[in-house]
Image (cartoon, grey):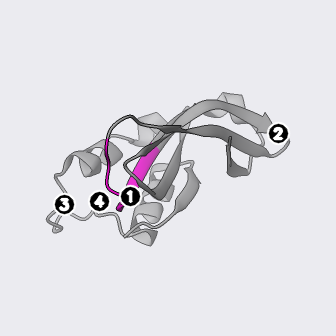
Amino acid sequence: ITMSVLEMANSLQELKDLCDAWGNPAFQESNEYYNNELSQKIRSYNEAYFSEKILIVYSFDRGHSKETRIDSITVDGLQLVVNTRLVTKKGTFSDEAFNWLILIEVNKADITGVTTVQVKQK
């Protein structure tokens, strides 16, 4: 079960290792969630994808009343910075926290030399 993840996957193997580390069943054919929509989406990132791109996996717990939006992605030295903001949604929501997952696709050519990723929230 994922609690909070912020990682960069540079290859299919790194993505598989991340899935193993955070308990995601995307590559476990015997798991009951193997064919769910999220697992299928994760498996769509194949060797061809990773030849020119990386995948940033950002997962966190938050209630339904707030939505995380990505404003921009910048490079600061060796660090990739994902600038986010919280938007309060209209309506009545429970305070129960749920796990959210954002998959961010980035061109490798745009982040040459970057070794870490950070989220900055406004």
Q: How far separated are the C-alphas under marks 2 and 3?
A: 38 Å
Judge whether 114 appears above or below 25 on screen: above
Which residue is located at x 29 percent, y 59 percent? 27
Which residue is located at x 52 percent, y 60 percent? 5
**Which residue is more in the foreground, 19 or 61?**
61
Q: How far separated are the C-alphas under marks 1 and 4?
A: 20 Å
- Percent x, y for residue 48? 43, 35
Amino acid type of the residue tagged 1 in the rendering? Asn
Please tell me how crowded label 4 is: few (under 14), some (14-19), or many (20+) other residues with Cα within 10 Å: some
**Which residue is more in the foreground, 43 or 1?**
1
Residue 27 bears which disc, if any? 4
Q: Earlier in the sequence, mark 1 or mark 3?
A: 3
- Labels 4, 2: front one: 2
Q: How far separated are the C-alphas under marks 2 and 1?
A: 28 Å
Query: Is the C-beta separation of discs 3 and 4 under 8 Å?
Result: no
Q: Secondary structure at mark 2?
A: strand
Judge whether 106 appears above or below 22 on screen: above
Could one spot residue 117 in this view of the protein? yes
